[in-house]
Amino acid sequence: MYDTVNMWIDRENTAEGDPFAVLPFLSDITEKQSERFGYTCYGKLGDYTISCYQAGISLKGSLAKFYLPSNFYTLTRQQTRESVEKLSDLLHVDLGKAKVNRIDVSTVIPTKRPPSDYYSRLGSKPHFERVQTTKNTLYYQTQRRQLVFYDKLRETAAKGVERPSSLDGLDHFLRYELRFMGKLPSQLKCSTITAKTLSCGDFYYSIVQRWKQEFETIKKVYQSNNMVNLENIKTPRDAMGVLLAKLLQQNGQNTIDDFLADLKASNVFSDKKYYSRLKSDLTRLIQVTGNNGDDLTKELEAAVNNFARYAR
């Protein structure tokens, strides 16, 4: 379930206390001199960008791309251990002691329909900003954490990467990533997270469950093609409310977000609290619970649950 893993290893944990000792094992080396960092060297090792400073070594890249033949896949716990060992051998540095400062937890979910069809089922998420940058990519973000949903097939095709033959016969792939991008110990409630920690059973299980829980806190939109129950409509106001809810459910969360953005751009309300109140009221309309008619929402929920249940 791991993809990007960024690390830092202190000078004292490098070979003979010399961060620049790894340079013979890198390609595409460049040098730089600055007042802040002094003499610095940058190089490549597989998917990783290695930056050597006087204080230590920074490693930024995808551990999955470094170790696996295709970026359709992410790392299991066992593969994570093996990939850290391989990277350590190639750099001649024990990266088990390296501090991890970014982790992406993700997988590819085969879906019945194009990934973009599922985004309208994913509503707001408490304390996160929901941003759909393109038809094929949806973000939920805070300063330190991101959830990203995107069309993996389109992304790899744009980069000229072929999908593995083992996935032939499947037409649609949705990638769901949870990105921890800063202050990992406080986010994950660990005193220190090293590369060795990543393959520990308890830690791996907990971070995969966190991946699932972050998805679960997204407010889902259960759309249905069922006819409206007219017996619940007693007044014209009831009818207008039912129609508005139905239209919002059909068009998804983006309709609310775009409308609020237009209101804010025009400074419609003098009291800023009105924007949040309106968003809360409209979001309440779009969220229908207990609806058995929306197969796409349930398909996505079942897939996330299954991956979290069987990830090892």
Image (cartoon, rainbow, N blue to C red):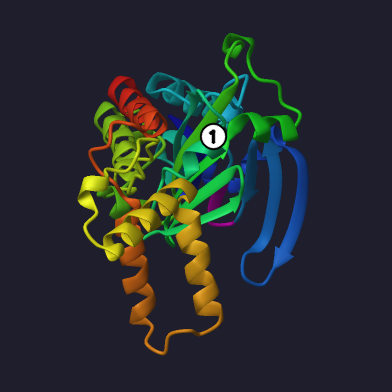
133 and 239: which is toward the camera: 239
Image quarter where the C terminus lies is: top left
Residue tagged by mark 1? Answer: 115
Badge 1, how many Cα within 10 Å: few under 14, some, many 20+?
A: many
54 and 117: which is toward the camera: 117
Residue 4 in view in this figure: yes
302 to the left or right of 258: left
162 and 103: which is toward the camera: 162
Is 80 above or below relative to 62? above
**Residue 2 image point, x, y percent:** 45, 32
Residue at the far bottom in the pictured view: 270
Residue 312 in view in this figure: no
**Residue 244 image point, x, y percent:** 39, 58
Tell me the magenta residue range: 54-58
Q: Which quadrant of the view contains residue 54?
A: bottom right
**Residue 157 image point, x, y percent:** 72, 30
Q: Is residue 187 magenta?
A: no
Image quarter where the N terminus lies is: top left
Q: Which quadrant of the view contains residue 227?
A: top left
Q: Amino acid at mark 1?
A: Pro
303 to the left or right of 36: left
Is 79 above or below relative to 192? above
Is 44 above or below relative to 277? above
